[in-house]
Amino acid sequence: MPNKKILDEFPEVVQANPDLTQKQKDVLITSIQLFAEQGYANTSTRQIAAAAHQSEGTMFKHFKSKANILRAALEPIIQEIIPDVEAEFKRETLNHPAANLHDFLDFFVRNRMAFAANNQDAIKVFFSELLYNETLRTQFIETARNELIAAFKDTILTLQKNKIIIDWPFNEIFRYMIAVVVGYVLDRYVLFPNREWDDEVEAGYLVAELEKVLQP
C-alpha cells in the first residue's frame, strides 16, 4: 500500500529551490502547514507571518496576498511531488497483476483509499484551490496527463485485451473510475469529515459500484 505523504516532502522540495530567499521558503513551508491544519479560509496572514518569524510587511513584499502564497506553495507540489506520486501509483497499482475485474478494482480502490487517508491534509489544501483556480488546475491536469493517464490507458487496454473489463472507449472508463473514487474522497475528507465512516464498508460499496458497470 502507498506510504508517500505529500506534505512531508514539501519542505525539502522548497528548501532546494535556488530561486527563493530563505524568508520566502519559510513562508511557504509555514503556510502550507497552517492551511492543512486549520483550512485556508481560517488561516490569517498574521498567523503565517508570526509562524514564519517575520513581519506581515516583509511577507507581503514577496507574495502580495494570501492567495499568492497558496499558489506559490502548490506549484512545487504539482511540478515536483505529484510526478513522484504518479510513479508510485503506476508501480503499485497499475502494474499489479489481476486475474479478474474484482481483484483489479479491489486493489485499485483500497490503494487509492489508503493514499487519501495518508494525505488528507494535502487533499484539503488542494481542493480548496484547484476547484476554483483555472491556472493551477490546468497545470495539475497537464502534469497528470504526462504519466498517469498514459499508464492508466495501457493498463485498461491490457484488461480489455484479456476480456477482463468492458470494451468501452478508454476515456469513458477512466472518467467513471476517477469520478467514483474522487467522489468518495471529497465526501470523506472535504465535505463530511466528521461523519462516522466505516472505510471497510465504503471500500466494498465502491468496488461493487465499479464492478457492476465495468463488468464485460
Image: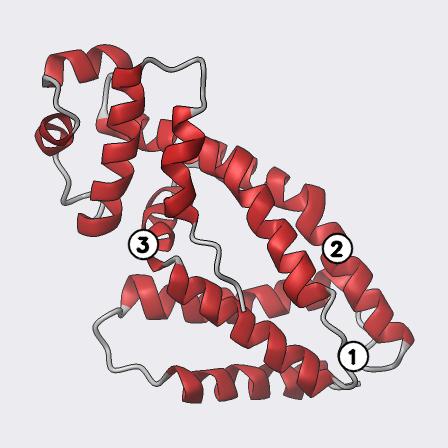
Apparent side of residue 165 relative to residue 22 in the rendered image (left or right): right
Q: Position of residue 14 (x, y in %)?
A: 40, 28
> Residue at point 14% right, 29% down?
45
Q: Nearer the viewer, residue 12 or 149?
A: 12
Q: In 3D space, how far apart are the residues under numbered discs 3 and 2 (Cα atoms)? A: 26 Å
Q: Tell me the quarter of the picture where residue 154 sits.
A: bottom right
Amino acid residing under circle 2: Ala
User: Callout 1: 10 Å neighbours few (<14), some, many (20+)?
Assistant: many
Apparent side of residue 211 relative to residue 97 in the rendered image (left or right): left
Residue at disc 1, secondary structure: loop
Q: Which residue is mark 3?
A: 121
Q: Which residue is mark 2?
A: 151
Q: In 3D space, how far apart are the residues under numbered discs 3 and 1 (Cα atoms)? A: 34 Å
* Residue 16 visible at all: yes
> Residue at point 81% right, 82% down?
164
Q: Is residue 60 above or below residue 116?
A: above
Q: Tell me the quarter of the picture where residue 89 sits.
A: bottom right
Q: Are marks 3 and 1 in contact (CB under 8 Å)?
A: no
Amino acid residing under circle 3: Asp
Q: Point out the tag, 1 or 2, that comes first from the N-terminus.
A: 2
Q: Is residue 118 above or below residue 149?
A: below
Q: Are marks 3 and 2 in contact (CB under 8 Å)?
A: no
> Residue at point 70% right, 46% down?
147
Task: Select label 1 or label 2 by which is in front.
Answer: 2
Residue at disc 2, secondary structure: helix
Q: Position of residue 39 (x, y in %)?
A: 21, 48
Residue 165 marker: 1
Q: Position of residue 40 (x, y in %)?
A: 23, 43
